[in-house]
Amino acid sequence: MWDVLSALIPPTVVAAVFCAIVYTVLRKEMAPRTSDGRLLKEAEAGDVQTASRPDTNASADGGAKNAPGSSTEVPDGREEPGGR
């Protein structure tokens, strides 16, 4: 019986190490991520660092309202006198 048990120990150890590696890799790859691919923990840590020093030039909408061509009016198809 001991010879059978001693023959099974090395494959069992190899299988356990393989399962542990697969578990850690899958856990890392399946971690929640932001839309740009960063890990959520890293993004939260970055937000804490940037929150301590606010950007005075940033607006809540990212400046989208001040961007050229951001008019809320829908063109009706007629050309304006300025060639627009």
Image: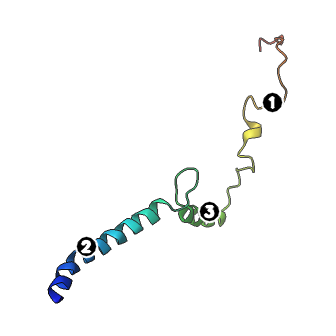
> Quick one: quadrant of the N terminus?
bottom left
Which residue in the protein does label 2 denote? 14
Which tag, 1 or 2, sits closer to the chain's start?
A: 2
Disc 1 designates what residue? 71
Q: Which numbered dot is residue 46?
A: none
Closer to the camera in the image, 42 or 35: 35
The crowding category of the residue bearing disc 2, from other C-alpha atoms within 10 Å (few below 14, some 14 to 19, many at least 20), is few
What residue is drawn where x is 74% and y is 49%?
59
Q: CA distance from mark 3 to mark 2?
A: 41 Å
Q: Are marks 1 and 2 in contact (CB under 8 Å)?
A: no
Residue in the foreground of this view, choosing between 16 and 41: 16
Whole-percent x and y of residue 53? 65, 63
Figure check: 53 above or below 78: below
Q: Local crowd at mark 3 within 10 Å, few (<14), some, or many (≥20)?
A: few
* Residue 65 placement (x, y as % from top left): 77, 39
Q: Nearer the viewer, residue 17 or 8?
A: 8
Residue drawn where x is 23% and y is 74% of the image:
11
Residue 30 pos. (x, y %): 49, 60
Residue at (17% x, 83% y) in the render: 4
- Secondary element type, mark 2: helix
Q: Amino acid at mark 1?
A: Ser
